[in-house]
Amino acid sequence: MYYTRPASEDVSHVLNIMGAVHPIDSKLIEEFKKHLLQLRINKDQILFNENEVCEYIYFIVKGALMGCTTHNKQKITTYISVENDFVSSISGLHGSGYSQEYVVAVEDTHLLAMRNDELNRLFSHHFELNYIFRVVLEKYYKDAQQRAHIIRVGNAKERYLYFAKTNPGYLDRLPLELVASLLNVKASTLLSIRKNFSGKDKNKELEEWGQKLELHINKHQSFRHKDVRLQSLAKEVGLSSHKLSIVLNSYFNKSFIDYINQYRVNWIKGSIRNPDIMQNFTLEALAYSAGFSSRSAFYNSFKKLVGMSPVEYSKKPKSTETIA
C-alpha cells in the first residue's frame, strides 16, 4: 500500500475530533503533524488480513470499512465503521499480536494512519492521548456490548430498529447483505422489515429534538464554552448522549465538532459586521471569545465552513456578507 503525506486540513480535522474529547497540547499536535500518513484504498480492497500484524491505527476521513472473520468458510461481519471512526486490529491492538480479523473497504475510503510504534511512544509521554483513546475504546466496547446483547435476545425487527437508531443513515448507504451479516439475520428478512417499517414517527421525533437543541444553543450560547463536549451539551439540553448524536448526524447532517464550530463561526461573522466590535477586538480575540481553543483551530474551521480565511472575509464588502 502507498502511504503519502496528508493534507493539513485532514490532520486538523482529526486533531479537532480528538480535541473535542480532551484538549491537546502543542507538542502532541506537532507529533501528529509529523507522523500522520495518508492512505486511499478502493472498494473491496483489504486494509489488513487475518493472521498478520496490523502495524497502524487508522482514522477514517471518508468512506466505510468493515471488520470480518471467517468460520467454517463463512464470512462473518463483526463491525462497520465510517467517517470519524478510529480503526485497527481488535485482537492485535497497537500491534500487540496477530489479527484474528481482516478489514476491507465497503466504499472507496480515505484514511489517515499512524504507526503503532510511534503511537505507543506518544502514549508514554502524553497523558491526554491516553485519556482520548480510553474514551474511544470505551465507546467501542459499549457499542459492541449493546450489539451483542440485541443479537442474542432481540428478534429480527428489534435488531433492525436497534441498528437504525444507533447508526443513522447506514441503512441507506451500506449494502443490505452487509448489515444483515452484522445483525445475524437473513438479507431477505431484513429487506421485508425495512419495507414495512415507517420512518414518519422517527422523523417527527428527530425534528422535535432538533428544535429543542437549537432553542437551547441560541438561548445559552453553549458553543462559546471552550470545554463543551457532546456529553455536557446533552446534559444541558436534557437528552442522552446517544439521542444527541442521532440528532446531529441525522437531522443536521453534521458531526458534533462541525455543528459547534458552525455556531462559533456564525457568531464571529456577525461580530465582524459590527464596526464597534472590530475597533476593540482582534480576530483572534473574537475566536477565543467564540469558544475556539487555538488560533489554528479557528482559522481551519473558518476556512472549511466559509471557504475563505477570516482575514479575507473581514475585507469583504458588507453587502455581500451572509450567515451560513
Image (spheres, rainbow, N blue to C red):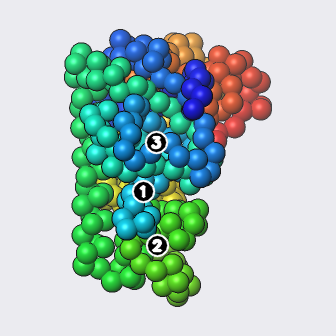
Say whether marks 2 and 1 touch (CB < 8 Å).
Answer: no
Residue count near mark 3 (Cα–Cα under 10 Å), binned few <14, some 14–19, many ≥20? some
- Which structural element holds mark 3? strand
- Residue 166 appears in the figure: no
Q: Work out whether 249 lies above or below 113.
A: below
- What residue is disc 2 on? 180
Q: For residue 294, what is the image quadrant?
A: top left
Q: Work out whether 114 lies above or below 46.
A: above
Nearer the observer: mark 3 or 2; the answer is 3
Residue occupying image coordinates x 42% and y 56%: 68
Three-letter code, disc 2:
Ala
**Left of 282 or right of it: where is 245?**
left
Residue count near mark 1 (Cα–Cα under 10 Å), binned few <14, some 14–19, many ≥20? many
Q: For residue 226, what is the image quadrant?
A: top left
For the residue pair 137 and 232, the one nearer the viewer reads as 137
**Left of 20 or right of it: where is 255?**
right
Q: Earlier in the sequence, mark 2 or mark 1?
A: 1
For the residue pair 75 and 159, the one nearer the viewer reads as 75
- Which structural element holds mark 1? strand
For the residue pair 81 and 21, the one nearer the viewer reads as 81
CA separation in Å, label 3 and label 2? 23 Å
Kindly identify which numbered label has been placed on residue 48: 3
Q: Residue pushed farthest front? A: 72
Residue count near mark 2 (Cα–Cα under 10 Å), binned few <14, some 14–19, many ≥20? many
